[in-house]
Image: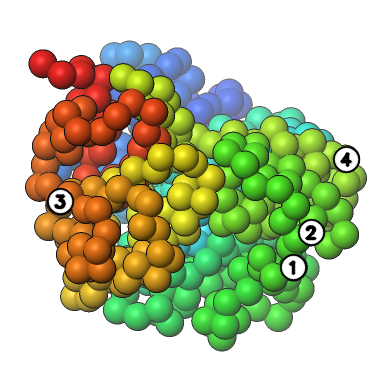
Amino acid sequence: MREDEIVKASGAEVLKSCGESNDYTISTDTRTIKKQDIYLPLKGANFDGENFIADALNKGASGYFTTGDKIFNNASIVLKVDNTLKTYLKLANFYRNKINPVVIAITGSSGKTTTKEMVYSVVKEKYNTIKTFSNHNNEIGFCQTVFEMTHETDVLIVEMGMRGLGEIELISKYAEPDYAVITNAGSAHIGRLGSLENIARAKCEVAQYLNKNGTFIALNQERIKNAVNFDGEKIYYSLDSVEVLERKPAYSRFIYKDKEYVLNTEGDYNIENSLSAIELGYKLNMSYEEIKRGLASYRPIEKRWEVQEISGYKVINDSYNANPESMKAAVKTFIELYKNPVVVLGDMGELGEKELEFHREVGEYLVNQNYKNVKFITIGNLAAEIGTVLGRAGYQVKSFRENSEASCYILDNLDVGNTIFLKASRSMKFEEIIEGLKRGKL
């Protein structure tokens, strides 16, 4: 953006001006600063980017934003604002409208990153597409994603996460989406929001600034239908509209609305995630062949059903995140598809006052599935509640406090040829189990 565009978009007070019509890039990281960058110092609870303005200039930045009045001599441009994060959002919104892509916003309690990757796999078959990197789904990640666009970008896919009410609405305000997707409204973050109805309200904030001529696409859940406030087109999808033709490890084949598709991953919940990608493909005037080809090109990303061979065991790592709904669905899929199954479950985080109840509920669900041929291992004080329920019902269960204890138990007691499934919240650091298995017996 030119200096005059940056000043207009940010509403900044100009303390020093270059007066030239050069194009500048906004940078928030002094580690990657380049010439023609304007440094925007962000602030957090434990850091203040304004302490690094001199460093940014010494590395070649042309100018900087500040909330103070200090002017460095080696800066060509100095702009004063009240709040640098809000400025970042304003600049991202300006650039979003300057490039003017089709904007797709994706959120949900679980499956949003997987869905984003599936949507990307489909849409890129026809359009030049930019997506949120990994799970960088907060305000800063949104801005970073926007500034990845070039003048050739046709579609921008923005993943939106949240920890409380108002956060998705804020990102939506500056993203101005044309299409909004909600994968589901489940119990993730219920500890912060208090009820499933509040979670649905928070997710439906994605529609607050949805283009009135756009489309709202969501899982067919009553709590979402009751919470959404959007007068435009709405599409609701569910597995009830799907005929599954074939289920195998790393493979699903199904019919949706009279057309056949293939996913190179397992699980009915992944089929469900893919339905919004299919719907979006048609809304973007893509052909059936383009959508089918794009969906087939999707591959799971790190820690999402990641299959490895370790010390003679097949290990499936799905420990990127966990809530009661995703844990039940993932375990069910694993046990149905793999021989000699060993299920390793860890604590699920951010479930609030009912966290013990939610963990027991997972145990009760597994008991009702009658998985008597399965060995279960739990790790952590909360996951131990799952183990207690399973143990009372006569299941094979071992419970541990530490990851290292679990990996030692597996190596000492389980035959090679077992398939081991890992599911927990990220905070459990289940990669430590994998490292323990790789080291082998000492």
Q: Secondary structure at mark 3?
A: strand
Where residue 254 sits in the image (x, y, percent)?
A: 75, 52
Residue designated by label 2 = 256
Q: How far apart, in angstroms, are the residues tagged by discs 3 and 2?
A: 41 Å
Indicate left or right for 157 with 65 as reference. Answer: right
Report the front residue among 156 and 267: 267
Residue contact at pointers 2 and 1, CB within 8 angstroms: yes
Q: Is residue 74 above or below residue 402?
A: above
- Res. 241 mark: 1
Return the residue at label 4: 289
Q: Amino acid at mark 3?
A: Ser
Q: Quadrant of residue 54?
A: top left
Mark 1 crowd level (few <14, some 14–19, many ≥20, 10 Å Cα): few
**Front residue of this view, candidates 365 and 64:** 365
CA distance separating discs 2 and 1: 6 Å
**Residue flagged by tag 1: what amino acid is it?**
Ser
Q: Nearer the viewer, mark 4 or mark 1?
A: 1
Q: Residue at x 60, y 55 (%)?
A: 268
Earlier residue among tags 4 and 1: 1
- Kind of residue sitting beneath label 4: Glu
Please determine whether, in this image, residue 347 is positioned above or below residue 131.
below
Give the left or right position of residue 253, taking residue 81 as reference.
right
Indicate which disc, 1 or 3, sits on the residue closer to the N terminus.
1
Residue highlighted by disc 3: 399
Measure how far apart labels 4 and 3 are at the Cα level.
Answer: 48 Å
Q: Is residue 43 visible?
A: yes
Q: Residues within 10 Å of mark 3 (few under 14, many from 20)?
A: many
Residue 95 or 316: which is nearer the viewer?
316
